[in-house]
């Protein structure tokens, strides 16, 4: 199935959505329509949000019967759940696993041991967030250029916080920015925290000078004026509170980072079951219910399903592997 992009309104849209709902509801036998979503982390994070939000809307649209409960399976940055999918859930048509760019990044770095992207079936992405770089409101830097120029001159004086592990997404964002500014990645001082909330607390407490995270994580602080966002890692400017924040590319540092939110299914589920999940996510993405839920969760429209998504994941793993080699993280 080709890329599906959510839209609002229009008679043609209504007919297309009705067709998708019919396909998604009828693609599996009655006994196989109940479902489970596994979030590869503890409750409260992005993977957990992806499962719970999607399950709620799929249930409202009657695309799964009896609801789609979320099971949390933390460990090894998603590696425990990935190994569970491959080793214990092969052929299970009733389960999907939350994934994101963090998943493909870890696959690219070989952090899941011998497991590879092709060991599972990549179903689709239904939303996204974009990376941001922020400082406290009283920080001396007014622009991203000022920060990176100062950072390059004295890298030992600046410490970055983020909600991902070392060499995870938030760390990679600043490593790539640093590379564009001529900063040796080995000199970047990064402190990982258990989520963006703790990382922001360290910024506001003055323990670090820079925060690397996603746009949704900083909204409340931006509203109160306690932080200043110096750049967004998106192809073009974001709307709303971020409308006046330039992209990193605008500031002279061509770095983009999209944290897509999506799913994979276990291996061996067969073409019919796989296409049923693709149809479900396509119907979800085209619905007004999803648009409202996505906006409430501060996710951006970003929809890619089926074969297009599988090809995208393969490309992204290779791109991330190249990035990791370029900045000296792997050989």
Image (cartoon, helix red, strand yellow):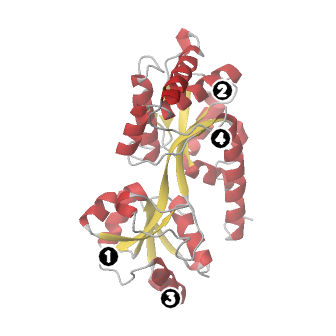
From this viewpoint, which residue is outermost toward the bottom? Answer: 153
Q: Position of residue 117 (x, y in %)?
A: 69, 43
> Nearer the N terminus, badge 4 or badge 2?
2
Q: Residues within 10 Å of mark 3 (few under 14, many from 20)?
A: few
> Nearer the N terminus, badge 4 or badge 1?
1
Q: Position of residue 4 (x, y in %)?
A: 59, 37
Q: Mark 2 sits on what residue?
A: 90
Q: Secondary structure at mark 3?
A: loop
> Nearer the N terminus, badge 2 or badge 1?
2
Based on the displayed image, in which of its 4 quarters is residue 124 positioned?
top right
Labelled disc at residue 206: 1
Q: Residues within 10 Å of mark 1 (few under 14, many from 20)?
A: few
Q: Residues within 10 Å of mark 2 (few under 14, many from 20)?
A: some
Q: Position of residue 171 (x, y in %)?
A: 53, 65
Q: Mark 3 sits on what residue?
A: 154
Do we see residue 161 in this rendering? Answer: yes
For the residues labelled 2 and 1, the Cα–Cα distance comes to: 48 Å
Q: Is residue 268 left or right of residue 181?
A: right
Q: Secondary structure at mark 1?
A: loop
For the residues labelled 1 and 3, the Cα–Cα distance comes to: 18 Å
Q: Residue at x 40, y 63 (%)?
A: 243
- Quadrant of the drawing holding the C terminus: bottom right
Q: Is residue 30 above or below residue 143?
A: above
Q: Mark 4 sits on what residue?
A: 309
Judging depth in this view, the residue of 330 and 17 nearest the camera is 17
Q: Residue at x 51, y 26 (%)?
A: 17
Q: Residues within 10 Å of mark 4 (few under 14, many from 20)?
A: many
Q: Position of residue 104 (x, y in %)?
A: 63, 50
Mark 4–mark 1 contact, CB under 8 Å? no
> Nearer the N terminus, badge 3 or badge 2?
2
From this viewpoint, which residue is outermost toward the right? Answer: 331
Q: Residue at x 39, y 82 (%)?
A: 141
């Amino acid at each position: 199935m080709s890329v599906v992009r959510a839209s609002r309104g229009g008679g043609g849209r209504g007919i297309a959505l009705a067709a998708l709902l019919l396909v998604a509801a009828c693609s599996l036998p009655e006994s196989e329509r109940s479902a489970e979503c596994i979030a590869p982390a503890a409750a409260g994070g992005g993977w957990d949000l992806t499962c719970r939000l999607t399950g709620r809307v799929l249930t409202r649209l009657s695309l799964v019967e009896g609801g789609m409960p979320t099971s949390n399976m933390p460990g090894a940055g998603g590696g425990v759940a990935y190994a569970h999918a491959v080793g214990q859930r092969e052929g299970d048509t009733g389960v999907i696993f939350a994934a994101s760019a963090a998943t493909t990044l870890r696959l690219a770095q070989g952090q899941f041991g011998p497991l590879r992207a092709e060991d599972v079936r990549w179903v689709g992405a239904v939303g996204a967030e974009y990376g941001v770089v922020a400082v406290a409101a009283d920080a001396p830097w007014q622009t991203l250029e000022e920060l990176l120029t100062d950072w390059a001159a004295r890298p030992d004086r600046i410490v970055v916080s983020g909600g991902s592990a070392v060499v995870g997404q938030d760390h990679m964002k600043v490593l790539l920015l640093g590379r564009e500014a001529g900063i040796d990645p080995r000199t970047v001082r990064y402190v990982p925290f258990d989520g963006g909330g703790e990382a922001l607390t360290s910024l506001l407490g003055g323990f670090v000078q820079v925060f690397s995270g996603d746009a949704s994580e900083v909204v409340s602080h931006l509203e109160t004026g306690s932080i200043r966002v110096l750049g967004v890692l998106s192809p073009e400017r974001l709307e709303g509170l971020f409308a006046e924040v330039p992209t990193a590319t605008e500031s002279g540092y061509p770095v983009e980072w999209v944290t897509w939110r999506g799913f994979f299914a276990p291996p061996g589920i067969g073409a019919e079951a796989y296409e049923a999940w693709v149809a479900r996510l396509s119907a979800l993405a085209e619905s007004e219910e999803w648009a409202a839920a996505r906006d409430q969760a501060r996710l951006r429209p970003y929809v890619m399903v089926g074969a297009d998504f599988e090809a995208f994941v393969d490309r992204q793993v290779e791109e991330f592997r190249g990035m990791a080699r370029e900045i000296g993280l792997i050989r």
